[in-house]
Amino acid sequence: MVSISEIQKVFKGRIALNEPLARFTTFRIGGMADYFVEPSDIDDVINIVKYANDKGIPYYVMGNGSNILISDEGIRGIVINLETSFNYLRMEGSKVVSGSGVKIARFVDFCIQNDKAGIEMLAGIPATVGGALVMNAGAYGGETADHVTEVTVVKGGKLKILAKEDCGFKYRNSELKSTVILEAKFELPAGNKEEVSLRRKELILQRNAAQPVEVPNAGCVFKNPKDNKAAMLIDKCGLKGTKYGGAMVSTKHANFIVNYDKATAHDVIELVKIIKQKVQAETGIDLEMEWKLIGFEEVTI
Ligand SMILES: Cc1cc2nc3c(=O)[nH]c(=O)nc-3n(C[C@H](O)[C@H](O)[C@H](O)COP(=O)(O)OP(=O)(O)OC[C@H]3O[C@@H](n4cnc5c(N)ncnc54)[C@H](O)[C@@H]3O)c2cc1C
């Protein structure tokens, strides 16, 4: 284990040792990170990535922790969080420029206040702009990549500006996973503030009625299989309300697992296995997990 003073030789931002990560996730689950760092600027990001690569220390970028399950043992290595210094929004001509640490709700609001439309359907996704770009998060017919023009990243220890075509955007995925995203530019169509705000409100109400937003969770557990809905398959198998430890299949939306009573990552994994096995046995369909698992030695689901 390296000391904080050694990292401070190349890094000006905040560094914490043994930082508990549960509070940085929407699931409220997960152990500690060896190092948790908040870069103060671009040089800090470049330097910490180079440092980690030189020392052979794994590093991981964390957004709002809304699509991940962190192991109870935590993360060996460096967790980089960009919500402090990459938390800016500005207009550049007709384009919206957003730091990667900005929360989607704030980003959408900024766009609406600047008479822009086309992103209001994303408002209820509990992500950062960085996490939403990596996952190409989307809802109600729109996705994050729709209006992106360029993304600034650190890749291979170097600062790069990627055109949209070089980001490898796909359905709920991209090729940005191997980068640290710093900021992105969006060109959005014009929109009437009142009308776009109203649509945002309606979609958030719709979302809140369908999803267990009042209990900690990490969004949909499984991808929808081709021509099928994971939630429908899980519901058909009578799994709503099934519990393992403090984890439960949501009674509101079958493709959500909720942390209803101090669930551990172990509880969640066991529940995922129960769901997968039952759906496989009853329908012959092998569900594929949506989340990214972090810090697990080896997990066979
Ligand atoms: C209640 C709820 C509802 C949801 N609804 C939707 C929905 O409607 N549509 C949808 O698509 N998703 C939805 N999700 C899932 C989730 O919000 C998205 O996948 C989101 O894009 C994750 O963003 P994040 O900032 O939380 O990223 P994290 O979960 O922190 O990370 C996700 C991945 O992105 C990487 N990453 C994050 N930031 C950066 C960065 N700056 N640079 C490089 N890599 C980075 C991480 O390393 C990780 O691989 C929902 C989740 C919840 C809890």
Image (cartoon, grey):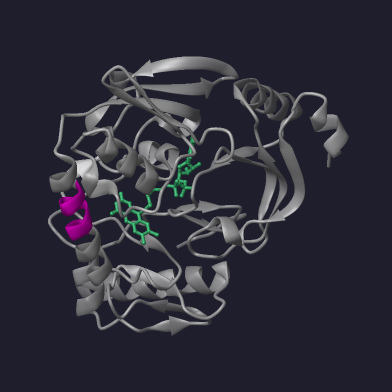
Q: Identify the image quadrant of residue 38.
A: top right
Q: Return the x and y of residue 139 as percentages of the image width and height.
A: 22, 50
Q: Return the x and y of residue 34 as percentages of the image width and height.
A: 74, 48
Write the residue at 50% across / 36% down: 87
On-image quarter of the N terminus = top right
Q: Return the x and y of residue 283 as percentages of the image width and height.
A: 20, 71
Residue 154 within the magenta-colored segment of the rendering: no
Residue 130 drawn above or below residue 50 = below
Residue 139 drawn above or below residue 256 = above
Write the residue at 59% across / 22% down: 42
Residue 108 drawn above or below residue 296 = above
Image-based side of 113 in relation to 273, left or right: left
Q: Return the x and y of residue 167 as percentages of the image width and height.
A: 35, 25
On-image quarter of the C terminus = bottom left
User: Main structural element of the magenta stretch: helix, strand or loop?
Assistant: helix
Q: Which of 84 and 149 is in front in this view?
A: 84
Q: Identify the image quadrant of residue 54.
A: top right
Give the tally of numbered discs.
0
Write the residue at 75% across / 46% down: 16
Write the residue at 63% across / 64% down: 72
Span shown in magenta: 197-203
Image-based side of 3 in relation to 134, left or right: right
